[in-house]
Image (cartoon, rainbow, N blue to C red):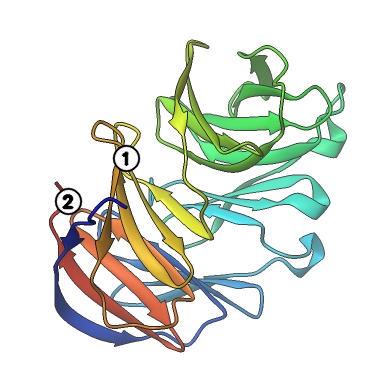
């Protein structure tokens, strides 16, 4: 059995967070969470957004704090919010001339949103201004089980734990086969942090090796990594650690 390196971390602070789901921090250190199906944003003030008519919030993309994307899968609808969680636009995909059943939604570049349609099994870019879809992938062989995005790429994991990414130009790359995980967050270059059996690990794709992350928490409800800070959410509190990834 290979000997496993341990990544040390330095505890910075513990913050109270009364919520059902902790989502993470944006690039301005504002925190996002959900409580009773209400989206909360905490900066120097507390902002909130709720739309009970659309059912349960499925996913929130806050990589651009000025254009937050909220996905309501059960109602096949996407809502765009500004930085104070005011509604900018509501997009109901049930009303489109060609039916689209949203399985994945994330922010892309140039007023576009990544979408994955479970009917055609294709990935597309929806233009918010022109209200048109440009399909950029062929039919995927396996469904998307997990996804993330940045402005120029959409990353997804299929049921066989294969990791892929597609660019806004439609180029698909296979980035590797992942280890089994309970929760995961991609970092860069096919590397990722993952949780397995209440332990956290960092996987480096180049060396194909996992390092255990030494944290105090025994029960992890959610973890989130950004800009060298690893945030661990346990019951009603977030603990932030400084971590240097190899």
Image: 183 above or below 150: below
Image: 133 above or below 69: above
In the rendered image, which quarter is residue 124 located in? top right
Percent across and percent down for residue 211 are 25, 55
Q: Secondary structure at mark 1?
A: loop
Image point (35%, 73%), residue name: 232
Percent across and percent down for residue 55 are 78, 64
Percent across and percent down for residue 127 are 59, 24
> In terms of depth relative to the viewer, which is nearer, 74 or 141?
141
Q: From this viewpoint, is residue 25 visible? A: no
Residue under pointer 2: 245
Q: From this viewpoint, is residue 161 visible? A: yes
Image point (86%, 38%), residue name: 94
Tell me if 172 is positioned left or right of 200 in this view. right
Label 1 – label 2 distance at C-alpha = 10 Å
> In terms of depth relative to the viewer, which is nearer, 240 or 69?
240
Q: How many marks?
A: 2
Image point (49%, 71%), residue name: 33
Image point (44%, 82%), residue name: 219
Tell me if 134 is positioned left or right of 4 in this view. right
Q: Residues within 10 Å of mark 2 (few under 14, many from 20)?
A: some
Residue under pointer 1: 191
């Amino acid at each position: 059995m290979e000997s496993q390196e341990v990544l040390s971390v330095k505890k910075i602070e513990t913050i109270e967070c009364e919520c059902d789901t902790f989502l993470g921090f944006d690039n301005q250190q504002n925190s996002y969470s959900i409580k009773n199906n209400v989206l909360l944003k905490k900066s120097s003030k507390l902002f909130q957004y709720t739309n009970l008519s659309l059912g349960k919030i499925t996913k929130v993309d806050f990589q651009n704090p000025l254009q937050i994307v909220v996905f309501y899968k059960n109602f096949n609808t996407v809502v765009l919010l500004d930085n104070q969680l005011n509604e900018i636009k509501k997009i109901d995909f049930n009303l489109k001339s060609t039916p689209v059943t949203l399985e994945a939604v994330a922010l892309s570049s140039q007023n576009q949103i990544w979408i994955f349609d479970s009917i055609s099994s294709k990935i597309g870019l929806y233009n918010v201004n022109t209200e048109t879809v440009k399909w950029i992938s062929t039919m995927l062989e396996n469904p998307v089980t997990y996804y993330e995005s940045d402005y120029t790429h959409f990353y997804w994991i299929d049921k066989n734990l294969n990791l892929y990414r597609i660019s806004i130009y439609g180029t698909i790359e296979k980035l590797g086969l992942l280890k089994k995980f309970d929760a995961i967050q991609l970092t860069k270059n096919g590397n990722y942090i993952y949780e397995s059996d209440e332990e956290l690990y960092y996987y480096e794709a180049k060396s194909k090796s996992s390092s255990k992350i030494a944290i105090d928490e025994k029960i992890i409800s959610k973890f989130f990594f950004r800009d060298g800070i690893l945030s661990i959410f346990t019951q009603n509190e977030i603990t932030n650690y400084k971590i240097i990834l190899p």
